[in-house]
């Protein structure tokens, strides 16, 4: 499969084909992945490739210069990028997620100002939700937002594990702006987030936003995943995304969008499977029935993971949100299993520094730890059984 995109800023001439990732884009992203995995530095070159490819505009509606792609196509695109560069796929996924939240929750002024920049690649978007001590479910946030005067806001806090930290041009920041007890007296528990939380769009050049990418990750090493400090960060009411205090309900609906990190896992699993086929072909091993059958079983596992991701994107399940959670759980587990078995097939050939199977393995394991983490997915699925 490949992605060919033709966009203009007016959105009048938008052609989208997700049959195959453009070979030049694919090769460039793969080169970037190798270099970034070696250095652990934020992959600025991969971001430049994404900007130039116009892939960043896929989730933006046509009237704002994007392609207006739905979740099925977005998942397919993320899968294809992940097959050559897991870090770029995560950055792309987060950009799509923020773009979609702005489409859903943004004001007309935010649509006019922000969406064309996201569509053209001028701006890269990132999510800054997680923080130390808040847990995977984003509760007990230490980041606080308080009103100053009538139309201003002051943010103080720190975010952890923010993808594209230091590379993004705009961050979707989650902050506690009110009481975390729901006003209606109910428990208000959506399993993710808490009452009194609000989203803000913070420009990357805001002097109160300070990124730190000194953290060295084992996987997704080019994703610029790090910390973001908010120190005396001043915003206006126009920077608030959506209504005040309702971020938790927005977060709860995100999984119903059909976009799933399972797509990243499928791309990595496919890359590992391709490596196994290439190894078998070069070594003349395809004549061995046992190996062929082993490859068939792995292919079936990848196809099954792709199918659940596809179903999540179609949003035609009885509960689309649950289908999305299951897709991440199944696809990430499948990727981990496929990579592990391919490592055995490669034997000593893969047990050398620099072989891509090692990067695939480290990147695949990272997907399970990304929000919502796999354990939180299990909690979100099972919590409904007690209601």
Image (cartoon, grey):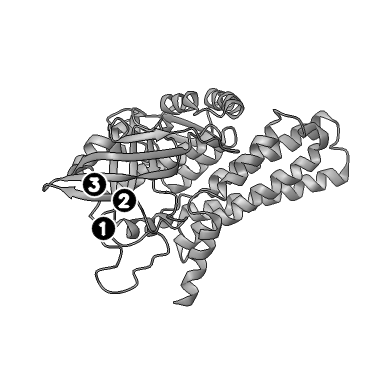
Residue mark closest to the camera, 2 vs 1: 2
Percent position of residue 316, x then y: 46, 60
Q: Who comes first in sequence, dot 2 or dot 3?
A: 2
Percent position of residue 82, x then y: 56, 37
Q: Residue at x 42, y 64 (%)?
A: 191
- Write down the residue under mark 3: 240
Q: Give neighbour class at mark 1: few <14, some 14-19, many 20+ (Cα, 10 Å).
A: many
Q: Give neighbour class at mark 3: few <14, some 14-19, many 20+ (Cα, 10 Å).
A: many
Under tag 1, what secondary structure? Answer: loop
Left or right side of 114 for 252: right
Q: Residue at x 70, y 43 (%)?
A: 339
Q: Give neighbour class at mark 2: few <14, some 14-19, many 20+ (Cα, 10 Å).
A: many
Disc 2 versus disc 3: distance between alpha carbons? Answer: 11 Å
- Write down the residue under mark 2: 175
Under tag 2, what secondary structure? Answer: strand
Residue 15 visible in image: no
Percent position of residue 169, x then y: 34, 32
Q: Who comes first in sequence, dot 2 or dot 1?
A: 2
- Res 245 label: 1
Of 135 and 319, nearer the camera is 135
Residue mark closest to the camera, 2 vs 3: 2
Q: Residue at x 84, y 37 (%)?
A: 286
Is 6 placed above or below 192 here? above
Quadrant including the N terminus = top right
Residue 87 visible in image: yes
Of 208 and 383, nearer the camera is 208
Q: Residue furthest bottom?
A: 387
Disc 2 versus disc 1: distance between alpha carbons? Answer: 9 Å
Percent position of residue 132, x then y: 44, 50
The quadrant in which residue 165 appears is top left
The quadrant in which residue 243 appears is bottom left
């Amino acid at each position: 499969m490949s992605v060919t995109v033709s966009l203009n800023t007016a959105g009048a001439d938008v052609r989208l084909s997700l049959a195959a990732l453009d070979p030049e884009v694919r090769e460039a992203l793969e080169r970037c992945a190798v270099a970034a995995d070696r250095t652990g530095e934020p992959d600025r070159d991969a971001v430049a490739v994404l900007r130039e490819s116009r892939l960043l505009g896929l989730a933006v509606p046509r009237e704002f210069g994007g392609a207006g792609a739905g979740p099925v196509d977005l998942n397919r695109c993320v899968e294809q990028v992940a097959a050559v560069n897991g870090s770029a796929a995560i950055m792309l996924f987060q950009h799509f997620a923020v773009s979609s939240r702005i489409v859903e929750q943004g004001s007309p002024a935010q649509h006019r100002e922000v969406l064309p920049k996201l569509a053209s690649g001028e701006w890269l978007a990132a999510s800054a939700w997680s923080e130390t001590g808040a847990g995977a479910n984003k509760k007990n946030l230490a980041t606080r937002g308080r009103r100053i005067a009538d139309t201003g806001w002051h943010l103080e806090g720190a975010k952890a594990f923010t993808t594209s930290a230091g590379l993004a041009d705009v961050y979707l920041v989650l902050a506690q702006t009110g009481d975390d007890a729901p006003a209606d007296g109910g428990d208000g528990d959506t399993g993710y987030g808490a009452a009194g939380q609000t989203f803000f769009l913070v420009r990357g050049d805001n002097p109160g936003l300070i990124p730190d990418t000194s953290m060295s990750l084992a996987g997704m090493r080019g994703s610029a995943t790090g910390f973001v400090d908010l120190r005396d960060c001043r915003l206006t009411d126009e920077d608030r995304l959506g209504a005040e205090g309702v971020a938790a309900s927005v977060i709860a609906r995100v999984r119903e969008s059909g976009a799933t990190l399972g797509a990243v896992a499928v791309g990595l699993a496919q890359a590992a499977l391709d490596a196994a086929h290439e190894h078998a072909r070069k070594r003349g091993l395809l004549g061995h029935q046992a190996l062929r059958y082993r490859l068939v079983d792995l292919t079936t596992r990848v196809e099954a993971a792709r199918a659940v991701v596809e179903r999540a994107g179609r949003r035609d399940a009885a509960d689309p949100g649950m289908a999305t959670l299951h897709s991440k759980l199944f696809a990430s587990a499948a990727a981990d299993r496929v990579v592990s078995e391919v490592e055995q097939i490669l034997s000593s050939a893969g047990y050398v520094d620099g072989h891509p199977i090692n990067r695939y393995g480290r990147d695949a394991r990272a997907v399970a730890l990304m929000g919502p983490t796999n354990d939180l997915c299990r909690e979100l699925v099972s919590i409904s059984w007690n209601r």
